[in-house]
């Protein structure tokens, strides 16, 4: 995630919204004076940051991923230590 001082990298992604959701998005963006894309970015980040179950799952995934990236010798030592 980019810090406030860094320019975020943007990706193009095509999404399909229900008509009601799309209209609400456009209305809300107009109401607060920013683009619909900015609203989506803010809403997604806030929603995901507040989802503690997802944050817990994500932490577990990161730990598992880091564990699989250990050097082979270190991984072997850890497996041997756990088995003992």
Image (cartoon, rainbow, N blue to C red):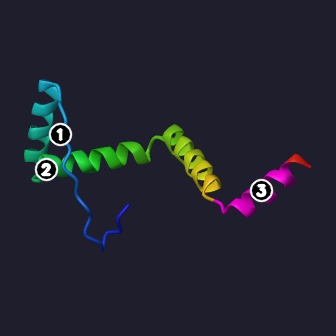
Q: Residues within 10 Å of mark 2 (few under 14, many from 20)?
A: few
**Is 79 above or below relative to 27?**
below
Who's the residue at 9% across and 39% down the image?
Answer: 26
- Expressed as whole percent of the image width and height from the top left, the position of residue 31 reads 10, 46
Which one is in front in this view, the residue at disc 3 or the one at disc 2? 3
Residue at numbered disc 1: 14
Who's the residue at 27% across and 64% down the image?
Answer: 8
Which one is in front in this view, the residue at disc 2 or the one at disc 1? 1
Lateral position of residue 40 relative to residue 35, left or right? right
Quarter of the image with the N terminus in it: bottom left
Circles 2, 1 touching at the beta carbon (< 8 Å): no
Q: Residues within 10 Å of mark 1 (few under 14, many from 20)?
A: few
Residue at numbered disc 3: 76
**Is 4 above or below relative to 13?**
below
Label 2 and label 1: CA atoms lie apart by 23 Å
Label 3 and label 2: CA atoms lie apart by 55 Å
Lateral position of residue 60 relative to residue 32, left or right? right
Label 1 and label 3: CA atoms lie apart by 44 Å
In the rendering, which numbered label is found on residue 32? 2
Who's the residue at 15% across and 38% down the image?
Answer: 25
Main SS, magenta residues: helix
- Expressed as whole percent of the image width and height from the top left, the position of residue 77 reads 81, 59
Who's the residue at 31% across and 44% down the image?
Answer: 44
* Nearer-N-terminus badge (3/2): 2
Circles 3, 2 touching at the beta carbon (< 8 Å): no
| Residue 76 within the magenta-colored segment of the rendering | yes
Mark 3 lies on a secondary structure that is helix
Q: Quadrant of residue 73?
A: bottom right
- Expressed as whole percent of the image width and height from the top left, the position of residue 4 reads 31, 69
Q: Nearer the viewer, residue 15 or 33?
A: 15
Which one is in front in this view, the residue at disc 1 or the one at disc 3? 3
Magenta stretch? 70-82
């Amino acid at each position: 995630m980019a810090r406030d001082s860094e320019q975020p990298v943007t990706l193009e992604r095509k999404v399909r919204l229900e008509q009601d959701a799309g209209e609400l998005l456009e209305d809300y963006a107009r109401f607060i004076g920013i683009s619909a894309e900015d609203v989506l970015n803010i809403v997604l980040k806030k929603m995901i940051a507040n989802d503690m179950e997802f944050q817990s799952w994500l932490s577990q995934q990161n730990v598992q991923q880091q564990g699989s990236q250990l050097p082979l010798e270190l991984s072997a030592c850890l497996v041997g230590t756990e088995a003992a």
